[in-house]
Image (cartoon, helix red, strand yellow):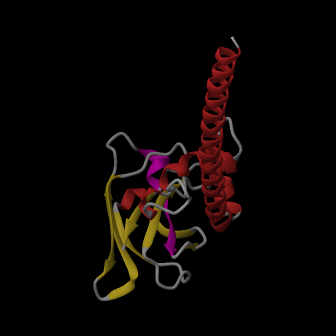
Amino acid sequence: MYECENSYFGIHMILKKYLFQGVACEKGRKGEEQRLYRQRISKASAYWRALRSVQIAKIWNSAAEQMNDNAWFMKLNMPALEMEGTLIDPKLLKVSADKLTLPQQFTAERKPDDAATIVVSWQNDPHIKGERLLDELMVVSYANDQFSPVTATSLVRGVKNGLFSLPPHPTVATHVYLFMASRDCEAYSESVCFEI
């Protein structure tokens, strides 16, 4: 009888040790996932701080219906970041998101003989009329985790093409984010990014 109890005790201890190691291993994995998630949130917050200005806050406040501006920005931009927080591609980042529609067939490229000038063109939805044709094209340039302030281009939706100068900083922009703003700057479109 004593031998049987001893073997039961031994099996119980082996199972307990196995389960404990399994739980410890599971906790370690979850701890690492949580650390990476916090790192990702921290990087998204850093992008928010880099972009944040009076106008960017206004854009995101307008777009966020049931969240604050920071939370809405984070929610829409988390897919642009790897698990540890590195930016997958600047094109995935959104600097604007709101209710206005973005023009169709949008193109943007540097002017061949002037690197500081961007040539843009687009098509308007045939249903857009009236005041919406006066929405102005806005630009934010990007390079090496630095963003320019939101800059008006003086191009309105109705003209469907034109030229504008890049904001002076960052000096060697690699990407531009373009979006439309209403005349009163109370409504915005989602941004679209172009590598230039």
Q: Quadrant of residue 64?
A: top right
Tell me what residue is drawn at x 67 percent, y 46 percent. Answer: 71
Image position of 134 (left or right of 74):
left
Q: Tag count in the figure?
A: 0
Residue 175 position, x and y percent, is 43, 71
Up/down of 55 relative to 142, above or below:
above
- Judging depth in this view, the residue of 110 and 2 nearest the camera is 2
Q: Is residue 12 above or below residue 121?
A: above
Residue drawn at 34 percent across, 60 percent down = 160
Residue 137 colored magenta? yes
x, y percent for residue 27: 65, 41
In the rendered image, the quadrant that contains the C terminus is bottom left
Residue 143 as seen in the image, left or right of residue 67: left
Residue 31 or residue 57, whichever sits in front: 31
| 154 sits left or right of 72 in the view | left
Residue 120 inside the magenta-drawn segment:
no
Which residue is more in the foreground, 175 or 118?
A: 175
* Position of 99 relative to 38 (above/below): above
Residue 30, image x, y percentages: 62, 43
Task: Name which residue lies at 56% across and 81% down.
Answer: 169
Stretch of the chain drawn in magenta = 129-143
Residue 36: x, y in percent?
Answer: 60, 54
Q: Which residue is at the far bottom?
A: 113
Residue 67 visible in the shown view = yes
Q: Is residue 135 visible?
A: no
Q: Quadrant of residue 119?
A: bottom left
Q: Nearer the viewer, residue 131 or 145?
A: 145
Placement of the N terminus among the 4 image quadrants: top right
